[in-house]
Image (tube, rainbow, N blue to C red):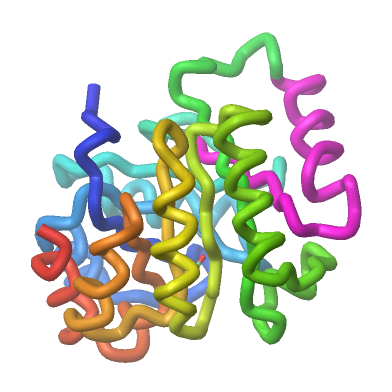
Amino acid sequence: MYNIDEWKHIFKLDPAKEIAEEMIDKVCESGTDAIIIGGTDNITLDGVLRLLSSIRHHDIPVILEISTIESVTPGYDYYFVPMVLNSQDKKWMMDIQHQAVTEYGDVINWNEMFAEGYCIMNEHSKVFKHANCKLPTDEEAIGYARMAEHLLRLPFFYLEYSGTYGDVSLVQSISEELDNTKLIYGGGIETKEQAAEVSAFADIIVVGNALYDNPKEALLTVQATK
Ligand code: 1GP
């Protein structure tokens, strides 16, 4: 339905945060390629449905990044399933996904479902602590990227710096490793300059927090990737 191969820019909206309807309209009309609904805590079915209904009357693909089984609902175009490669607990890599598939496997439309191999690089982020991650060295991060591409054959490798702007030289090194697996970069992008810089290497960049902190500037990140 949509051509994911052409996506360069995604805005991520957090169902646990307040955002004005007019702002949602601006996000949808910004020229961004898709919108991800996702966050780390206080994700409720109500929040997920509310954002979906505000976005739905715009012609833009909308993705639910699944953080809890309880907040999954039909109606999204795609469902992204995080598998946290650098978690120290098997739970975040395998078990919660397994539980969901065991429970809902009969009704899942697999064409809408994509796994994301997450590598979480910001030790101070909520998600790093939540998923009990271990900070990889650059070499180890490249190792995860190679696993995502060659062993696991994942559609996406997500280099996640959530809340802080990352190391662009590592983004470059990882992008050089990936051919079939798409590199998603997210974290700390606040300006169009940063968007352009990281977009030179990542297939897709994700902008989240800036939409809430400095929306005017955040909206400008779209054009920097085109
Ligand atoms: C978070 O990667 C996204 O999952 C975006 O990060 O909120 O720091 O932009 P920011």
Residue 118 visible, this orientation: yes
Q: Quadrant of residue 108?
A: top right
Q: Measured from the top left, where is residue 5 in percent x and y?
A: 26, 34
Residue 190 or residue 52, whichever sits in front: 190
Q: Is residue 212 above or below residue 153?
A: below
148 relative position to 89: left or right: left
Q: Which residues are magenta?
A: 79-104
Q: Is residue 45 above or below residue 125?
A: above
The image quadrant where one finds the N terminus is top left
Residue shown at the point (20%, 39%) measured from the top left: 6
Residue 120 or residue 52, whichever sits in front: 120
Q: Measured from the top left, where is residue 128 in percent x and y?
A: 72, 72
Q: Quadrant of residue 224?
A: bottom left
Q: Is residue 201 above or below residue 104?
A: below
Residue 42 visible, this orientation: no
Q: Measured from the top left, where is residue 33 in percent x and y?
A: 21, 49
Residue shown at the point (16%, 46%) measured from the top left: 58
Residue shown at the point (56%, 43%) measured from the top left: 116
Q: Residue 97 in magenta?
A: yes
30 relative position to 124: left or right: left
